[in-house]
């Protein structure tokens, strides 16, 4: 129904079921980037000429759009290169604050991007890294949460939605419990924002991050929300972030610009605005309902086949499966030779898979452009796997 908006998919040659890795871009996003470059591009706020003023207007407008979308203030949003950079910014700025007697709490469900920076922070500071485990129901073991938060915990970092299991975590409940223990919260929203609309004021987390390429914009773009931007120090130093520099000293600006050193990725910013306008136009609730319907159909069909579904039964956009007979890479290769794009391997979440007793899986993930026909193409190709591999 919405596939026609996506040039890379509109000829129906490819069945793309790998949106949890990267979403395809709609024509509106592609055209917005090309129109911007065509009209002439510049750095925002760095020159006294029309192109620079235009870039500045786009920079401000996009932040306002996003602030509106997420119910926060534009002064709380930092343009980054994606979730990985966003989380590293937060972890890096805690390096001089965390004490050896404190702890950081992560979950077993994390993408490596929301695990490695915290592992390193603990190595650097001597703090303990505690782990909230996964239950056999593919959910977080919330019954241990308070015990771990009360272990002199400074911050809890967790994913809004698991990139392997599709589990939608009860982030509001976890954030509010963490607040009760005076613990800061970092939410990795990467797998959530294309499927739901987080209200950051209501969630009341300290940090929230997502990447543009998971919401129909290009890679290398992202947003970090900071409830109190003053709590964060810059990861990068350079142009655009200072009031005054002398031979031996610099004084950072007090606003959010101090976290955005260097020239901005204006094409990325243009694309982010356009991608959110596109999602807005279709309606996030319509997108979510459409994806849920596709997922339901997929699950019913897979349950009649010789595969084990390892994702959460309520997952809205991700279906991960394993086979007793075949390696996930071999399955994905047969699928790829039938023009079906999926993801196979550990999906950068090794502790998550290990906790459930697996090393790898095939991950099928839907985006707003997918159709029932895509589901059938996938299932027909999956049925051929045994003939190719036996
Ligand atoms: C849950 C989650 N967090 C973080 C990331 C890292 O995102 P990026 O590579 O865009 O920084 C991903 C990417 O797949 C993810 O799924």
Image (tube, helix red, strand yellow):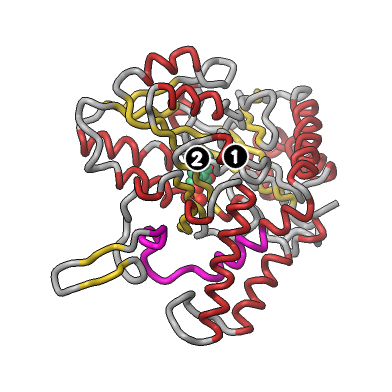
Provide the residue designation for mark 1.
Answer: 330
Quadrant housing residue 31: bottom right
Look at the image and say whether residue 266 sits in the magenta stretch.
yes
Q: Is disc 2's CB within 8 Å of ligand 1?
A: yes
Residue ID at (55%, 34%): 203
Q: Main secondary structure of the magenta part?
A: helix
Q: Which mark is residue 42?
A: none
Q: In the rendered structure, which segment of residues is drawn in magenta?
A: 255-275
Look at the image and say whether residue 368 sits in the magenta stretch.
no
Q: Is residue 42 above or below residue 58?
A: below
Q: Is residue 282 above or below residue 252?
A: above
Q: Is disc 1's CB within 8 Å of ligand 1?
A: no
Whole-percent x, y for residue 166 in the image? 62, 32
**Mark 2 element type:** strand
**Mark 1 element type:** helix
Q: Residues within 10 Å of mark 2 (few under 14, many from 20)?
A: many
Pick the front one: 47 or 42 = 47
Quadrant for the C terminus in the image: top right
Residue ID at (53%, 56%): 74
Give the mark, 2 or 1, whose residue is nearer the N terminus.
2
Whole-percent x, y for residue 287 in the image? 76, 44
Pick the front one: 333 or 119 = 119
Does residue 327 appear anywhere in the picture? Answer: no
189 with respect to 156 (left or right): right
Quadrant housing residue 235: bottom left
Does residue 172 appear anywhere in the picture? Answer: yes
Pick the front one: 213 or 347 = 213
Whole-percent x, y for residue 333 in the image? 62, 45
Provide the residue designation for mark 2.
Answer: 188
329 with respect to 287 (left or right): left
Whole-percent x, y for residue 106 in the image? 40, 29
């Amino acid at each position: 129904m919405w596939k026609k908006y996506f040039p890379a998919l509109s000829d129906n040659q490819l069945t793309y079921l790998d949106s949890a890795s990267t979403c395809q871009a709609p024509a509106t996003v592609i055209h917005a980037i090309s129109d911007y470059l065509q009209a002439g591009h510049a750095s925002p706020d760095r020159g006294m000429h029309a192109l620079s003023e235009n870039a500045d207007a786009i920079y401000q407008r996009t932040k306002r759009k996003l602030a509106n979308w997420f119910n926060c203030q534009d002064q709380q949003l930092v343009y980054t290169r994606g979730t990985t950079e966003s989380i590293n910014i937060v972890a890096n700025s805690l390096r001089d604050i965390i004490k050896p007697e404190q702890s950081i709490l992560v979950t077993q469900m994390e993408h490596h991007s929301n695990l490695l920076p915290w592992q390193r922070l603990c190595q650097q500071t001597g703090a303990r890294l505690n782990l909230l485990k996964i239950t056999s129901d593919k959910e977080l073991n919330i019954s241990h949460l308070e015990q771990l938060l009360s272990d002199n915990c400074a911050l809890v970092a967790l994913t809004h939605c698991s990139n392997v299991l599709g589990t939608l975590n009860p982030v509001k409940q976890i954030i509010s419990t963490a607040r009760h223990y005076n613990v800061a919260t970092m939410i990795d929203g990467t797998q959530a924002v294309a499927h739901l609309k987080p209200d950051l004021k209501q969630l009341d987390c300290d940090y929230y991050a997502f990447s543009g390429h998971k919401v129909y914009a290009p890679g290398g773009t992202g947003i970090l929300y900071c409830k109190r931007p003053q709590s964060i120090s810059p990861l990068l130093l350079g142009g655009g972030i200072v009031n005054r520099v002398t031979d031996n000293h610099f004084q950072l600006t007090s606003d959010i610009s101090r976290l955005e050193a260097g020239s901005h990725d204006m094409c990325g910013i243009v694309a982010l605005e356009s991608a959110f306008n596109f999602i807005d136009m279709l309606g996030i609730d319509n997108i979510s309902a459409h994806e849920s319907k596709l997922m339901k159909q997929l699950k019913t069909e897979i349950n009649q086949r010789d595969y084990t579904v390892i994702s959460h039964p309520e997952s809205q956009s991700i279906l991960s499966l394993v086979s007793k007979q075949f390696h996930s890479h071999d399955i994905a290769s047969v699928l790829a030779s039938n023009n079906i794009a999926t993801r196979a391997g550990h999906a950068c979440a090794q502790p998550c898979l290990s906790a459930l007793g697996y090393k790898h899986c095939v991950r099928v993930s839907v985006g707003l452009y997918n159709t029932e026909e895509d589901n059938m193409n996938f299932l027909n190709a999956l049925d051929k796997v045994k003939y190719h591999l036996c």
